[in-house]
Amino acid sequence: MAKIIGGLTTSHVPAIGGAIAKGLQQDPYWKPFFDGFGPAREWLAETKPDVAVIFYNDHGLNFFLDKMPTFAIGAARQYFNADEGWGIPTVAPFDGSLDLSWKIIDHLVSREFDVTTCQEMLIDHAATMPLKLFWPNDEGPTQIVPVCINTVQFPLPSAKRCIALGKAVGEAVAGWDSDKKVVMIGSGGLSHQLEGQRAGFINKPFDLAFMKSLIDDPEWAAQFSILELVEKTGTQGVELLMWLAARAAVPGDVRKVHSNYHIPISNTAAGMMALAAA
Ligand code: DHB
Ligand code: FE
C-alpha cells in the first residue's frame, strides 16, 4: 500500500513567483521567508515523496464566479499553469497521477462527498508555488493530485467539513494499492486580507495558535465558524482551511520537522510547516 510520509503547509503569494524568477532569495526582504524552507527541503531529500496531493484554492484561473465547486478534484494526465494576471512567469506543466485521482474520487463519493471531477484543470499559483518552494530544482514528486477547496465565493465549506474531507482523502491514499510515497500539501493563509477597510489585516497570535494546534490538537480550528475565521484571519486568511485539510489527510500523530512564520510577504503573514507522519 502507498505510504503517507507527512504534510507540508505554506502560504502562497503571487509575488513569491516573481522573487523566484528574479533570484531574490537572498535579498533582505525575501531571505527570512525563503530560509524557512531549508530544513524542510533536507527532510524531503531524505524521504523523497513520489506523489503530492495538493489542497489549494483556485483564485479565478480555472473556476470563475459563474461556476464555483465547493470541492473539485483533478483527474488529468497533466496540469497546466497559465497567466493569472499577476505578472508572474507561467511555470511548466505537472504530471498527474490518474490512478490516485480516481482512487480519491471513488472513495470521496462513496463517503458522501459530492465532488466535482476535473479531467482538465488549470492550476494557479496556489497549487504550483508550494512545489517550487519545497523543491526549488524540480527534484520533487513526479506526479500530483490537485484538490481544490472554494475560499473565493461564499458560502464556503466549514473547517469541520474540510477536516472531514482531508481525513477521507487520507483514507483513500492509505488504501491505494501502490508502493509510492505520498506527501500532503496545504497551500494558503495565514492571516491576510487584500481588500476593504481591513486591507492589510494580520493576526499573529491567532496564526501562531493555529500552527501549534496542527501538531497537538488538529481539530482545534473546527470550533470556529467560517465568519469567525474571517473575523480572526481576514477574508483571504480563511485559506487556512487548506492547512486543516492537509493535516487531517495525514493519519495519526505528526512530528514537527520545521516551521517558520514571517510578517509580511506582500499583504500576507507567511507561514510554513513540515510535519512528519509519526
Ligand atoms: C496575496 C496573497 C494571496 O493569498 C493571494 O492569493 C494573492 C495575493 C498577497 O498578499 O499579495
Ligand atoms: Fe490566495
Image (spheres, rainbow, N blue to C red):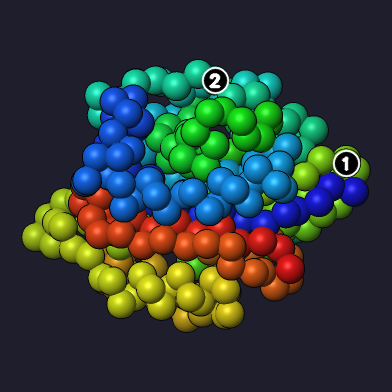
Q: Is residue 235 visible?
A: no
The amino acid on which the numbered mark 1 sits, given as a three-letter code, is Asp
Cα–Cα span, label 2 and label 1: 24 Å
Which residue in the structure is indicated by mark 1? Answer: 179
Q: Is residue 232 visible?
A: yes
As drawn, 114 above or below 16:
below
The amino acid on which the numbered mark 2 sits, given as a three-letter code, is Pro
Between residue 187 and residue 229, name the one nearer to us.
187
Which residue in the structure is indicated by mark 2? Answer: 93
Q: Position of residue 60 (x, y in %)?
A: 36, 34
Is 50 situated left or right of 54 in this image?
Answer: right
Label 1 near label 2: C-beta < 8 Å? Answer: no
Query: Could you say whether the residue bearing mark 2 is in a helix, strand or loop?
Result: loop
- Check disc 1: other Cα within 10 Å, few if <14, some if 14-19, many if 20+: few
- Check disc 2: other Cα within 10 Å, few if <14, some if 14-19, many if 20+: some
Residue 178, located in which quarter of the rendered image? Answer: top right
Is 242 situated left or right of 120 in this image?
Answer: left
Q: Position of residue 179 (x, y in %)?
A: 88, 41
Q: Position of residue 163 (x, y in %)?
A: 59, 65
Residue at 23 percent of width and 65 percent of height = 202
Is 219 situated left or right of 62 in this image?
Answer: right
